[in-house]
Amino acid sequence: MSAANRSAVAALTVAVVFTLFAGAPGAATATQSGSGAGSGVCSGVTRCHVRAHADVNGDGRVDSVGVASRGHGANREVIVRVRTAPDQISTARQKAPNWLGSLWHGVARLDGRRGVEIVVGETEGLHAHLYRAMTWRHGDLTTLRAPGHDRYWYTDGAYSIGAGWQVRAGTAPGTIRRRVAIRVSPTRARPFRGHVNTFHWDSGDWVRVSTKKVPEMRQRRAYSWGGFYVPGLPRWS
């Protein structure tokens, strides 16, 4: 990564942390649909790989999910395709600047509605990972914004921060916790402070149902908050 890109990503990470505590809206992603004419989900798309077989559109039948990557560096793009019927393939594209590894992350039920969400990489920083979740709405793929109305789902794990998402066993479908721990002292026995915001999907939007502040945390606990703790998704890419 060039020095210019490193500077841009570092600035982005600072903005993300501010967003998590202050809140800010993000931009949406356009999608498009096309006919598959009975072909496979990756047919005609170079460097496309089938990544999952799961019910995406919520009709109770298994769909095929394919992912392809184009370009590199600031110009990298991810293409997500879903085959929901023999003659129907839906396609969504998004920019994925500076993501170095595989863009595929997994499928999971995030909002609790019928059908799984597709999670792919969006932007990778020095230690931050920003993901895009795609969901099925009105017959096509679209972005499922993270709680707080961010277009991305942010995770982080570094010396001064642990940030991630958790779905607790036994909670109602569509309930998810955003956990962020920030280092506030280099010397205290409990050098971190944390925020846990619990959200529930209700009537087409995320609603915050509770907030918990942890004024002092040990480093080990803070670091354990980083990444995804969501069935179907690995903790880290």
Image: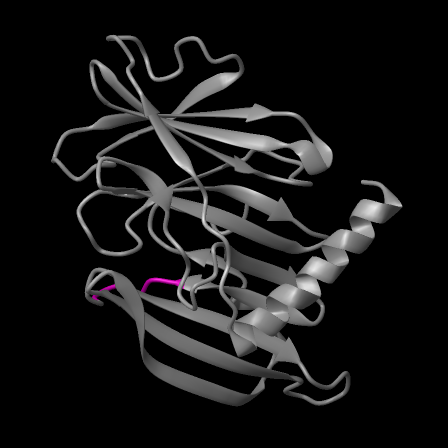
- State the image coordinates of residue 132 (x, y, percent, origin top left): 47, 47
In this rendered view, identify the residue nearer to me: 115 or 91: 91
- State the image coordinates of residue 166 (x, y, percent, origin top left): 39, 63
Give the residue at x 47% y 71%.
179
In this rendered view, identify the residue nearer to me: 153 or 235: 153
In this rendered view, identify the residue nearer to me: 136 or 60: 136
Decide if residue 221 is in sight here: no
Extreme-left residue of the structure? 60
Q: Which quadrant does the C terminus fall into?
A: top right
Q: Is 3 left or right of 216, judged from the image as shown?
A: right
In the rendered view, would you say 84 is above or below 4?
above
- State the image coordinates of residue 162 (x, y, percent, origin top left): 59, 68
Give the residue at x 71% y 38%.
74
Q: Is residue 174 magenta?
A: no
In the rendered view, would you say 187 is above or below 44?
below
Q: Which residues are magenta?
A: 166-170
Decide if residue 67 is in sight here: yes
Q: How many marks?
A: 0
Q: Is 109 left or right of 3, judged from the image as shown?
A: left
Q: Main secondary structure of the magenta part?
A: loop
In the rendered view, would you say 71 is above or below 167?
above
- State the image coordinates of residue 119 (x, y, percent, origin top left): 42, 43
In this rendered view, identify the residue nearer to me: 146 or 160: 146
Structure colour scheme: one colour
Q: Is 133 left or right of 191, judged from the image as shown?
A: left
Extreme-right residue of the structure? 3
Give the residue at x 54% y 71%.
20
Give the residue at x 57% y 70%.
19
Q: Which quadrant does the N terminus fall into?
A: top right
